Image: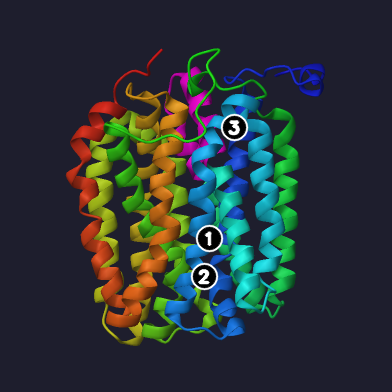
Amino acid sequence: MESAHDAMMGHPVSANRPATRLATRLAFLAAGFSLSCWAPLVPYARARLGVDDATLGLLLLCLGIGSVVAMPATAPLSARYGTRPVILGGGLGMALALPALATVDSLAGAAAALLLFGASLGTLDVAMNVHAVEVERDADRPLMSGFHGLFSVGGFAGSGGMTLLLAAGLAPWAAACLGAALVLVMLALAAPRLLRARPVTAGAEGKRAPLFVRPRGIVALLGVLALVTFLAEGALLDWGALLMTDHRGVSPTQAGLGYTLFSLAMMAGRLTGDRVVAALGGRRVMLWGGLTAIAGLAVLLLAPQTPSGVWLAFAGFPLIGAGAANLVPVLFSAAGRQRVMPPALAVAGMTAIGYAGMLGGPALIGFIARGMGLPTAFALLTALMALVPLSAGPVGRVGDQPAAS
């Protein structure tokens, strides 16, 4: 374990040390927790602002805009200054924005809070994945699913804890403040153990990284697949609760259960995912994971409109989570192993495309829901998910090859 002197003086920390892997997991935990605290607050925000689905979709677009604008510059900033300050800055921004999301009562205030929340999320997400790519390269064994598993642990704890607090009668602003405080604790624990050296995967030594990157080749395909997968996750995050309240008659205090089940299944899948990926390879994970997620969406949409059908619809959430669990980790590992672009820049470009789906896609779903209904919007999403198993071959060929030296 690194010495206290090294940590205090800011000397580079080995990426292959247990403390560094622990810090990486804490960063993913903080990101998943803070993001998922927002999911149960969405119905309350809509009621407080008095908006319809289309207007809510526009507001959610602000979250996506903030994220995709921040993402392309994050890897170059990490290359120049190291991932540690970028991770800490992004996490701090999310902690500050969360209470605002639970209290603002004007459209302008909500838009500003969502922009900050999205930009902070985008910054944290890219920086922690660049950090994770570096740690996985040095370990020379699958670690990415485990790192993303801690994101899912945070998702389960954030959405589940917030749902329980709201059901117990705690005011949304008080629950959000409690969540923000826990995020700050996680960041404080991770800070001394994060890598302080600039990532060697960012580009050739001595060259200044470009401020923005454009994905090309296999990286563009990885980005499109990330977009589809993140779109499904974002749809469940922002619209899953509303689908259950508006079309299944579920109480708002219980609607967050669906995303909690989704997060729990994804957590279990990712915590065991490193062994699964090592045993099956990326191609089979993409194929069978994509098909399972499609089956879960079908269950969610086709369950009968009966009391027992409500619980069957809820069962679709964990099925989606189990199928999607290791899709994104396989994509990130492939981005770290491809040879078209420097891995850190590939991670940034792929993530920017992907989060356009997760954070901008729900706005599009809002417009589709207004004209055609929310179930139709989810049906279109189900068809789009077919791209994942269809692309299993090329992704597997890249992700299962040795890492570039």
The quadrant where residue 142 appears:
top left
**Numbered disc 3: secondary structure:** helix
Q: Residue at x 56, y 63 (%)?
A: 159
- Image x and y of residue 71, in percent: 51, 43
Q: Nearer the viewer, residue 21 or 117?
A: 117
CB-based contact (under 8 Å), mark 2 and mark 1: yes
**Numbered disc 1: secondary structure:** helix
Q: Residue at x 45, y 83 (%)?
A: 250
Q: Amino acid at mark 2?
A: Leu
* N-terminal label among 3 and 2: 2
- Image x and y of residue 268, in percent: 45, 49
Disc 3 packing (10 Å; few <14; some 14–19; many ≥20):
many
In the image, residue 379 sits, relative to residue 348, either above or below, namely below
The quadrant where residue 393 appears:
top left
Instruction: Locate the C terminus by quadrant.
Output: top left
Q: Residue at x 31, y 74 (%)?
A: 368
What range of the chain is rendered magenta? Answer: 126-149
Q: Amino acid at mark 1?
A: Leu
In the image, residue 303 sits, relative to residue 214, either above or below, namely below
**Numbered disc 2: secondary structure:** helix
Disc 1 packing (10 Å; few <14; some 14–19; many ≥20):
many
Q: Nearer the viewer, residue 98 or 79?
A: 79
Q: Is residue 399 magenta?
A: no
Tag 1 residue: 63
Q: CA distance from mark 3 to mark 2?
A: 28 Å
Residue 53 in sight in this render: yes
Q: Amino acid at mark 3?
A: Leu
The quadrant where residue 100 appears:
bottom right
Tag 2 residue: 59
